Amino acid sequence: MTKTAVVTGASSGIGAATARRLAAEGYRVVLVARRKERLEALAAEIAESTKIAESAQSGGAAEAVALDVTDAEAIKAFAAGLESCDVLVNNAGGAIGADPVAGADPGDWRSMFETNVLGALNFTQALLPKLIASGEGTVVMLTSTAGHIAYENGAGYAASKHAMHAMTATLRLELFDQPVRVIEIAPGMVMTDEFSVKRFGGDADKAASVYAGVPGPLLAEDVADCIAWSVTRPAHVNVDLMIVRPRAQAAQHKVHRVAD
């Protein structure tokens, strides 16, 4: 029987790359995000690339579901209508702003906590019964190296990712006697189309400066590879935490850059 993986934040970046990769590994992928048109386009792409027709199995190779991860009631309804779930990838989230604590906008912090932390909580709570029932369930929390070390002008984002790290570790303890793995993937510098642009309010130049001169920042596909590898280990193998950075990033604050 084909296993089902639910990927949140699947309309772009790491989420989209993870959906493609898990589909290639043989999973039926349920794509979740707010932008329905992008999800439908990705679902069609996955169906074509895996050569599985819509009628070949329930929902085809991929199914697009437009949902806001902060809408707990809609997520409960979604979970109730899902036949089964073997893997949940809590990827939805992002960073807003790069301000010092003294001048930070509480609204930005609230938005990050609602999406990054509560969004992951909503999906985990809703799908946990099905993950347990699968007999070999896996929860993947996509956090960040920012969830392990603080840095200037990033307190709001770092705080939300620290909260996700704490939730992940706690969930693993609480599920120690259940057939569910709890995996944390914490990437460092990843260059995607939208992450930094959104962080800086659409300022493409400022977003590009984050990666300026960095030889080989991580790409979404690199992180998706880590997620897929962790998920496809034998069921008794739990990758508690994987921190992955580009070679040029020795630490959060130490990044090699070359002149143009």
Image (cartoon, rainbow, N blue to C red):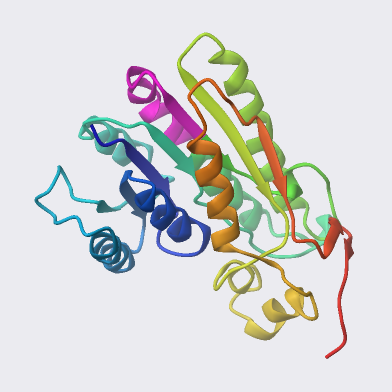
Q: Is residue 52 left or right of residue 16?
A: left
Residue 149 location, quadrant: top right
Position of 128 with respect to 210 (left or right) is left
Give the main secondary structure, helix, strand or loop, of the magenta stretch.
helix
**9 in magenta:** no
Would you say residue 132 sits in the magenta stretch? Answer: yes
Above/below status of 123 relative to 160: above
Q: Residue furthest left?
A: 55
96 is higher (above) or lower (below) than 72: below
On the image, the x and y values in percent for residue 3 come to 31, 35
Where residue 151 appears, as percent x and y from the top left, is: 85, 54
Question: How many circles with numbers are drawn on the protein?
Answer: 0
Residue 84 relative to residue 210: left or right: left
Farthest residue, direction top: 177
Does any portion of residue 258 appear in the rendered image? yes
Quarter placement of the N terminus:
top left
Q: In the image as oriented, which residue stretches furthest toward the bottom?
A: 260
Quadrant where the C terminus is found in the figure? bottom right
Q: Position of 181 compared to 252: left or right?
A: left
Residue in the picture at 50% in, 27% down: 234
Where does the magenta region start and end?
121-139
Q: Is residue 111 visible?
A: no
- x then y, percent, for residue 233: 52, 33
**231 and 187: which is toward the camera:** 231
Residue found 64% across the figure and 67% down from its top: 199
Against 237, residue 221 (above or below) is below
Q: Position of residue 229 (x, y in %)?
A: 54, 43
Residue at x-position 29% and y-position 64%? 49
Q: In terms of image quadrants, where is residue 222?
A: bottom right
Report which quarter residue 5 is drawn in: top left
